[in-house]
Image: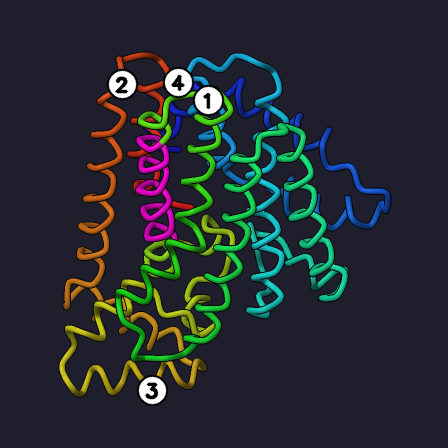
């Protein structure tokens, strides 16, 4: 475990334990199979960065009510729902080092459990009786669905542009983490200025989180990552490292890449050649530069608040978001 991750985990250990307890207490279906299917993924070792940001942003704004623990489960339920649906759509086999839910319970059950988690999240949001919070949670759900549809439309398309890619990840990942931070501020009764600051902070962290995930598909180890390396490409998902490399590659290399993207049945040797091409064209370093720019903007926002244990934790999360190995 990296020194940064160790330090961060020590700082947030109590909050993470509270979130874990709240997830267990608030996953309350009437059908046991729903708990088993949802729990298979929810309790399989997720990082809980999203609900943690919700808790920390509320705390930064002076919120001390215990309800935040329950409220934070909304963010993890929304995230888990999208993962369950994603794995069915992508015909994935491994998630967090375990067989995917649909390989055990089947696609129909898995999709319906994802739907249950979306509804459960909205149910908890409604308990606030705050129309603004309910609207934000509903908008997150809508945006994530549209992001998935956009990604599906562009699946396996070598012509996918960086702008189109950014629109997908903004909807799929950016809005969820943005909403986690924004609703923490709203729940605390923060001013519109502070709410916007924390929403912007969350947006930048969300973009970095997705770019980091995309990089890991070409730089990590399967055992550490918890899913098959190269899975994105085999599923027809063109991410920023691939898009930039396609743009910068020569005609022959581009034609070779397009063949791999179209065929998907590439060998390990071909995958290693692709990774080398990403390094040679600056695809990997370009992604890190884009992510680092978002981290810089996120940290500038947090530096605008008075220094505290919470701001220091948020700054550490910003650094950890990119510099992680899973």
Instruction: Tell me the element at label 1.
Output: helix
Residue under label 2, please give it: 305
Residue under label 1, please give it: 58
Task: Work out how far the residue at label 3 is from the one at label 2, CA to CA, in angstroms.
Answer: 50 Å
- Residue 160: x and y in percent read 31, 74
Residue under label 4, please give it: 60
Location of residue 58 with respect to 275 vertically, above or below: above
Task: Work out how far the residue at label 2 is from the one at label 1, CA to CA, in angstroms.
Answer: 13 Å
Q: Earlier in the sequence, mark 1 or mark 3?
A: 1
Instruction: Tell me the element at label 3.
Output: helix
Q: Are marks 1 and 4 in contact (CB under 8 Å)?
A: yes
Magenta highlight range: 196-213
Residue under label 3, please give it: 259
- Residue drawn at 37 percent across, 44 percent down: 206
In which image quadrant can residue 107 be found? Answer: bottom right
Instruction: Tell me the element at label 2.
Output: loop
Instruction: Tell me the element at label 4.
Output: helix
Task: Work out how far the residue at label 2 is from the one at label 4, CA to CA, in angstroms.
Answer: 9 Å
The foreground one among 132 and 206 is 132
């Amino acid at each position: 475990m990296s020194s940064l991750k160790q330090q961060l985990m020590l700082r947030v250990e109590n909050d993470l334990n509270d979130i874990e307890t709240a997830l267990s207490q608030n996953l309350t279906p009437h059908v046991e199979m729903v708990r088993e299917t949802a729990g298979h993924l929810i309790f399989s070792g997720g990082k809980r960065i999203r609900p943690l940001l919700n808790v920390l942003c509320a705390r930064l704004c002076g919120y001390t009510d215990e309800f935040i623990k329950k409220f934070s489960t909304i963010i993890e339920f929304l995230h888990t729902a999208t993962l369950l649906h994603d794995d069915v759509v992508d015909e994935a086999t491994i998630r967090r080092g375990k067989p995917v839910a649909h390989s055990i319970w089947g696609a129909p059950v898995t999709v319906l459990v994802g739907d249950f988690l979306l509804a459960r999240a909205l149910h908890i949001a409604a308990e606030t009786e705050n129309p603004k919070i309910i609207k934000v949670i509903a908008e997150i759900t809508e945006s994530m669905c549209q992001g998935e549809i956009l990604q599906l439309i562009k699946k396996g398309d070598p012509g996918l542009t960086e702008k189109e890619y950014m629109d997908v990840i903004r909807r799929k990942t950016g809005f969820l983490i943005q909403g986690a931070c924004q609703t923490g501020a709203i729940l605390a009764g923060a001013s519109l200025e502070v709410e916007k600051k924390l929403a912007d902070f969350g947006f930048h962290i969300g973009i970095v989180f997705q770019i980091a995930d995309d990089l890991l598909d070409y730089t990590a180890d399967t055992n550490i990552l918890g899913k098959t390396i190269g899975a994105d490409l085999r599923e027809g998902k063109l991410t920023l490292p691939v898009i930039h490399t396609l743009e910068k590659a020569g005609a022959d290399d581009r034609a070779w890449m397009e063949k791999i993207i179209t065929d998907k049945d590439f060998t390990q040797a071909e995958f290693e050649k692709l990774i080398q091409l990403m390094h040679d064209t600056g695809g990997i370093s370009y992604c890190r530069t884009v992510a680092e720019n978002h981290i810089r903007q996120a940290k500038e926002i947090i530096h605008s608040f008075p220094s505290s244990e919470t701001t220091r934790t948020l700054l550490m999360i910003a650094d950890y978001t990119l510099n992680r190995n899973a």
